[in-house]
Amino acid sequence: MGKSRLEAFSDGVIAIIITIMVLELKVPHGADWAALQPLWPVFLSYVLSFIYVGIYWNNHHHLIHTVSHVTGGALWGNLHLLFWLSLVPFVTSWVGENHFAALPLACYGFILFMSSIAYFVLAKCLAANNEALRVALGKDRKGKLSTLLYLIGIGMSLLVPMAGFAIYVVVAMIWFIPDRRFERR
């Protein structure tokens, strides 16, 4: 089966995810800088989540660009990834509204962790029938390190919430740099 439907559907879902997140940003009641101050946790959680969704969109593009066709397993793997990404607006809002409290932040990390697992599954499904993708993915050290850091971030979020948040920021910074495995191809 061709890849165009999977790519178009995924782009649409990701666009909706970003739209839902931005609609959660509420307009302040006031026209001065002081009116913005209570909203900084909501905005900061939105920025990090926007970056994460953008990273997944970018890397998803690289995966799909590398293959010429997709299997039924890849379609289910893609839906699995989109399911976890669709929960990002919920946990983003929960984290922001509760000023980076421990449980919401740990749940945020759990969604990131599950998204990384789902991305790994999708990549394996796609690579099963595509040698070029298999070579590009290699040992996927960056992906495995990220998944481990999410687990550490979840634990840290429960103990020292801002340390957990810092770990999530570090993982985003690791992925913000374009993935050279695909850029070379």
Image (tube, rainbow, N blue to C red):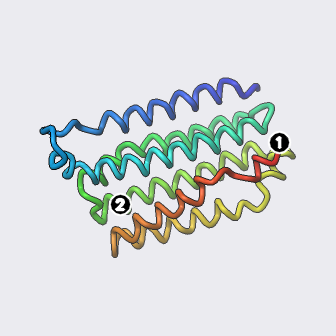
Residue under the point 29% across and 60% down: 100
Q: Does residue 185 appear left or right of residue 65 in this picture?
A: right
**For the view shown, which residue lies furthest in the right direction?**
131
SS at mark 1 in the image: loop
Residue under the point 85% across and 45% down: 132
Residue 46 at x, y = what percent?
Answer: 37, 46
**For the view shown, which residue lies furthest in the front direction?**
32
| Mark in the foreground, 1 or 2 | 2
Q: Nearer the viewer, residue 8 or 72?
A: 8
Give me the disc on residue 118: none
Residue under the point 70% across and 47% down: 123
Number of numbered discs overlaid on the protein picture: 2
Q: Does residue 1 appear left or right of residue 80 in this picture?
A: right
Bin the neighbour count of mark 1 within 10 Å (Cα to Cα): few under 14, some 14-19, many 20 and up: some
User: At label 1, which amino acid type do we have?
Assistant: Asn
Q: From the image, tell me which residue sits under label 2.
A: 105
Give me the disc on residue 129: 1
Q: Does residue 126 appear left or right of residue 23 in this picture?
A: right
Residue 124 at x, y = what percent?
Answer: 72, 49
